[in-house]
């Protein structure tokens, strides 16, 4: 008697699909997804999401294999936590045996069996500033612990014995290199067999290795707010990923790429190419599978559809559907875990009252930036309720302003940060952080001169570093009529002008040696990416 199938080697079903949105993008998502699909693509991406998120996906592979994905994540004081589950199953597989011989030989079905394969993910992610005392801003790290289960049920004792379980882990990083560019890296299944990174069959003393893969990629905002091409109405994202698997000999490196275009706030259109390896008569090659998708977002809910080729056979093309929910900042799940099970009552939230000053009246050119930053406790006025917008700002005040805007934790320095700043001076912890991050530096003689006013040219260099702008070593044209290409600050002034820092000087000379005023500092700071996002959240309250 012989069975109509044999036990196959372990297969990681997580490689098949991880959500309709990533599938529509050719699975080029290692540089960070801002929803729970990050559990399956790069766990570090969970750190980009600050609220509760749920995603699910279903589809049918090869007309027989039922495929299900569920992921849920939330942000907590200790970091972002996620749980994911993937399952593939086939039912009623015929179990056959051969009777007779020669012309009387026949294939007879004795019973049937069900096959299932699943992966459980436990994920964690955080920005590195949590572990590096404020350093590592914009760099997120994440990890998955994965539990695999695979095998048959039914069909008799021999079939029932074909089961197994395994354990492995992923490690991922996402770096927000620029406001419009994320870079990502994952090492999937990196645990060595000696510490449990393997799949063990119940009926065998040997274990299967779980293929390790390294993926690097980028996520570029081509069009949109802060995009390469600024646009308030449309958004276009381009994703690219390179994959290399270590365990398989002669397997080619694979590319994945995709684009996502949002013509409307509620509608996304996606195209991608997902390369997968395939066996050939001459070795191992790959298929470049075409993918496409559509996404719809309405309030907190989302629906995504993806079409995905699998090889050259038309019947292998599969349709996937995802449903998702993204909760408010204070989600029901978070309240439940904290012990607050009360039913929230609907309430009207008034827009926040802005902090005002008696000397910054209606019509002042920098009124809004000043009031926004004061309301956010980044800048402050004086006891007489004035702001003194035309007063020059000092180097120490600017250092404090930059550090406050990022919300870094402060501590009293163990040593003097500079020879002219006492440990107990109010500005010492701010200068220490600002200097460590190279936002603003001291002088060769070891001084900082915190009470010295800062010029526009010096401030242009400071704000360019603070905002992470790309500063060219040489520029072809003068950024302002009175700032020549050879001026030491010309590259920084040019970079700041390109992103709108100096719009308030339109049609005017730059005057690089003029002291920067408090109003100018508020205006420029309000246009840096990090602070701009804080202001957006502030003015959106109560809408």
Image: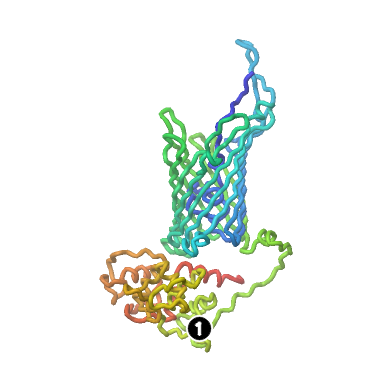
Quadrant for the C terminus in the image? bottom right
Quadrant for the N terminus in the image? top right
Q: Quadrant of residue 497?
A: bottom left
Specify whether residue 522 is in view: no
Asked if residue 305 lies left or right of residue 226, the reply is right
Asked if residue 29 lies left or right of residue 297, the reply is left
Please state the total of marks drawn on the protein image.
Answer: 1
For this orientation, the residue located farthest to the front is 415
For this orientation, the residue located farthest to the right is 342
Q: Secondary structure at mark 1?
A: loop
For this orientation, the residue located farthest to the left is 486
Q: Position of residue 144 (x, y in %)?
A: 56, 49
* Residue designated by label 1: 381
Q: Position of residue 403 (x, y in %)?
A: 47, 71
Please give the name of the residue rendered at 46% of the width and 80% of the height, measured from the top-left corner.
366
Dot 1: within a 10 Å radius of its alpha carbon, few (fewer than 14), some, or many (20 or more) residues?
Answer: some
Q: Is residue 494 above or below residue 515?
A: above
Q: How is the image coloured?
A: rainbow
Q: Is residue 93 above or below residue 254?
A: above
Q: Quadrant of residue 61?
A: top right
Q: Position of residue 392 (x, y in %)?
A: 40, 83
Asked if residue 518 lies left or right of residue 334, the reply is left
Q: Is residue 518 above or below residue 184?
A: below
Please give the name of the residue rendered at 54% of the width and 75% of the height, measured from the top-left corner.
376
Specify whether residue 290 is in view: yes
Q: Position of residue 107 (x, y in %)?
A: 64, 19
């Amino acid at each position: 008697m012989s069975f109509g199938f044999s036990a196959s080697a372990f297969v990681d079903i997580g490689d098949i699909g991880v959500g309709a949105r990533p599938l529509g993008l050719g699975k080029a998502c290692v540089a960070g997804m801002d929803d729970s699909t990050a559990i399956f693509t790069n766990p570090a991406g969970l750190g980009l999401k600050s609220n509760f998120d749920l995603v699910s996906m279903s589809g049918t592979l090869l007309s027989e294999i039922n495929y299900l994905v569920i992921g849920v994540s939330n942000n907590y004081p200790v970091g972002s936590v996620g749980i994911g589950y993937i399952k593939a199953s086939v039912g009623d597989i015929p179990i056959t045996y051969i009777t007779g011989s020669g012309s009387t030989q026949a294939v007879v079905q004795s019973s049937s069996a069900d096959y299932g394969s699943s992966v459980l993910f436990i994920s964690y992610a955080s920005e590195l500033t949590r572990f590096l005392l404020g350093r590592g801003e914009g760099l997120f790290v994440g990890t998955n612990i994965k539990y695999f289960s695979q095998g048959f049920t039914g069909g008799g004792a021999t079939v029932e014995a074909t089961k197994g379980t395994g354990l492995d882990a992923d490690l991922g990083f996402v770096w927000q290199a620029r406001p419009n560019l994320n870079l990502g890296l994952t090492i999937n299944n990196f645990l060595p067999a000696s510490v449990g990174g393997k799949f063990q069959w119940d009926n065998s003393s040997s274990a299967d290795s779980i293929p390790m893969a390294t993926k690097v990629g980028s996520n570029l905002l081509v069009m949109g707010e802060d995009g390469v091409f600024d646009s308030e109405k449309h958004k276009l994202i381009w994703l690219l990923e390179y994959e290399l698997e270590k365990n398989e000999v002669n397997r080619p490196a694979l590319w994945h790429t995709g684009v996502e275009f949002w013509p409307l706030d509620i509608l996304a259109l996606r195209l991608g190419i997902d390369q997968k390896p395939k066996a050939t008569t001459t070795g191992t090659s790959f298929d470049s599978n075409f993918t496409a998708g559509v996404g719809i977002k309405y309030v907190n809910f989302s629906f995504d559809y993806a079409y995905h080729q699998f090889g050259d056979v038309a019947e292998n093309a599969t349709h996937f559907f995802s449903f998702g929910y993204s909760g408010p900042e204070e989600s029901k799940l978070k309240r439940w875990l904290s012990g607050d099970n009360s039913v929230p009552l609907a309430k009207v939230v008034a827009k926040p009252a802005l902090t005002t000053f008696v000397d910054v009246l209606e019509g002042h050119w920098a009124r809004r930036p000043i009031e926004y930053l004061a309301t956010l406790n980044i800048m402050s006025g004086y006891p007489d309720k004035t702001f003194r917008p035309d007063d020059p700002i000092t180097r120490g005040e600017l250092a404090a302003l930059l550090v406050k805007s990022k919300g870094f934790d402060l501590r009293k320095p163990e040593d003097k940060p500079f020879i002219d700043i006492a440990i107990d001076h109010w500005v010492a912890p701010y200068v220490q952080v600002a200097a460590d991050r190279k936002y603003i530096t001291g002088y060769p003689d070891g001084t900082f001169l915190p009470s010295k006013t800062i010029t526009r040219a010096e401030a242009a260099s400071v704000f360019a570093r603070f905002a992470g702008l790309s500063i060219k070593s040489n520029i072809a044209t003068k950024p302002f009529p009175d700032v020549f290409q050879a001026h030491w600050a010309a590259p920084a002034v040019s970079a700041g002008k390109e992103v709108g820092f100096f719009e308030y000087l339109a049609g005017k000379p730059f005057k690089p040696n003029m002291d920067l005023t408090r109003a100018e500092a508020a205006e420029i700071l309000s246009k840096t990416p990090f602070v701009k996002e804080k202001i957006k959240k502030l003015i959106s309250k109560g809408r």
